Amino acid sequence: MEEAHSVNSPRRVLSFSKRRKQKPFGFQDSDNIRSSTLRASQVHGPKPSEVYGFVGSISTVVATLIFLIWAYVPDKLLESIGIHYYPSRYWVLAMPTYLMVTLLLGLAFYIGLNFIATPQPTSLNTLFDEYSREPGEIDSQMEEEDERPIDPISDIDITRINDLMFNSSHVE
């Protein structure tokens, strides 16, 4: 007999009550074994996205510190520490500049592609497409006093929208 608060699932009956049926020792479903091992791995340990975020933030801070040390520490101090090879100081300004110009050109290219893909304002493609639906006619067999069903989802004609928005006779 099923409990009052249960849902039929294609695999098994799911119960939302706090009481659980006790199974005899030694007889476990393979689903229960699999779900318990998955649940244990999900509860213990960090999620991969958290690990990637942590490593990414730490590596960003370290790279920024290395860049700032390279940019501001004099050459003689770097050589006294034992660092003899490092890029030219030209790249201190050139690298961020190239990066910013690349990002701005990418943004301009993306906006340009969107302008190219957009139809002209006078095109009928801005009003109708393959997913447009005309409002359906109401069943003529229904009488006035009968309850009317909810109309199916459809597009509102542009002339009706213009009439509602701009016709001053509707303003009260």
Image (spheres, rainbow, N blue to C red):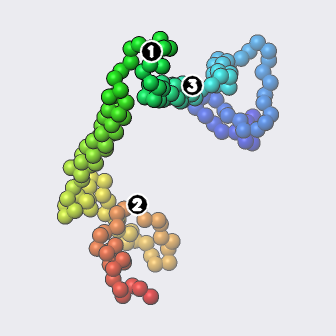
Left or right of 108 in this view: 147: right
- From the top left corner, tell me how far across and down residue 27 is, in percent: 74, 15
The amino acid at mark 2 is: Ile
Q: Secondary structure at mark 3?
A: helix
The residue that mark 3 highlights is 51
- Within 10 Å of disc 1 (Cα), the crowding (few <14, some 14-19, many 20+) is few
Q: Secondary structure at mark 1?
A: helix
Left or right of 11 in this view: 139: left
The residue that mark 1 highlights is 79
- Can you name the residue that lies furthest to the front here? 76
Does 135 appear above or below 89? Answer: below
Question: Is any part of residue 47 visible from this angle?
Answer: yes
Of residues 160 and 52, the one nearer the viewer is: 52
The first of marks 2 and 1 along the sequence is 1
Question: Is any part of residue 67 visible from this angle?
Answer: no
- From the top left corner, tell me how far across and down residue 41 is, in percent: 64, 21
Of residues 88 and 24, the one nearer the viewer is: 88
The first of marks 3 and 1 along the sequence is 3
Q: Residue at x 64, y 29 (%)?
A: 12
Q: CA distance from mark 3 to mark 2?
A: 45 Å
